[in-house]
Image: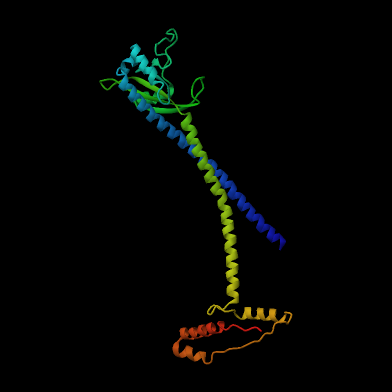
Amino acid sequence: MGGSIYKIKMRRFLQLAAYLVLGVFAALALYILLQTAVTRQLSSQALIDARLWASQLSHNVYNLPELARGRAPSHEVREVLRQSAEVGRVHSFRIYGADGTLMLRSGDLAKTRNHNNPPERIAAQFSDAVRTAKPATFIHKGKIIGEPTLFASTILPLMDDNGKVAGWLVINVDQNESQALFLHLAAVLSLTAGGLLAVIPFLVFWYRARQKIVAARQLKILSQHDQLTGLPNIVSFLSRMDAQLSGSGNDQSALIVCEIADLHLIDQNFGQQAADNAVLLTSSRLSEIKPERS
């Protein structure tokens, strides 16, 4: 008997442990999925920010295609570019020619770079975007001093008046604040989901235990009461008699036997329902009788 109880408890413990482990793995999986979603959301948001910034820049600097072809910016244009680079979350930008050669960058608007060195080319990750002439965004981690911890690089084509690609505008957008916000939300959602999955087994075990208690109570009531009248049945009657007879004898008791005469005739002449009604009415009247104690 003791071995069986131990096996049952051990089985329940293992089930509970399995549910807890499942909850932990589910939380981790959800966090990874949310991280992927965060990266995609950052890329989408960075592309929107870059397009808005480029649109505003094109409105203020009408000759961006000329800058991409190598034209030196005027003092007024350099001032506009410098101010634009300080707007919003844009960290830096670069302008490349149609062949992918660097023409201008935000940190060197006066074009003072060393021309003896080989010209800087557009990053290889943008090769597909250059080939298809479509915008693209990539998330990077800062590796150089002064760069944001996390930033998004977006490449946009610069179109001339004839609708041809005159060059490329690469915009780096700071993503530190956005990433921190999204990852915080992802962590909260993951912990919430993992906590719910960990609590569910406890709720299930509590509910099952409560259902067993309720079922045991109902079974006890059914086993000791008549289903028709709801009064104590013969089992309950005998149990009460044993308790009364085994008592100290201070209380006096009496046994009254009542019988409904010709109940079978009521059943034969008026049906089972009428006979049941007669039994119910009689039991109700008897239940109303309260014994008087001296």
Q: Is residue 212 above or below residue 152?
A: below
> Within the image, what quadrant is residue 163 found in?
top left
x and y percent of residue 95 in the render?
Answer: 38, 18
Q: Which residue lies furthest to the left in this view?
A: 162
Number of callouts: 0
- 137 and 59: which is toward the camera: 59
Question: Viewer-proximal residue, 200 or 245?
Answer: 245
> Is 30 drawn above or below residue 292 in the view shown?
above
Rendered residue at 57%/50% (across/down): 199
Residue located 36% across and 25% down the image: 53
**Nearer to me, 243 or 222:** 243
Residue 99 in view, yes or no: no
Q: Residue furthest front?
A: 294
**Colouring used for the render:** rainbow
> Could you tell me residue 154's position as x and y percent?
40, 26
Q: Residue furthest top?
A: 116
Residue at x 63% of width, y 55% of height: 12
In the depicted structure, whether residue 291 falls above or below residue 33: below
Q: Quadrant of residue 111?
A: top left
- For the N terminus, give its image quadrant: bottom right
Q: Where is residue 17 in the image (x, y as percent from the top left)?
A: 62, 49
Residue 292 in sight here:
yes
Looking at the image, residue 279 sits to the left or right of residue 156; the answer is right
Q: Quadrant of the C terminus?
A: bottom right
Furthest toward the right, the residue is 248
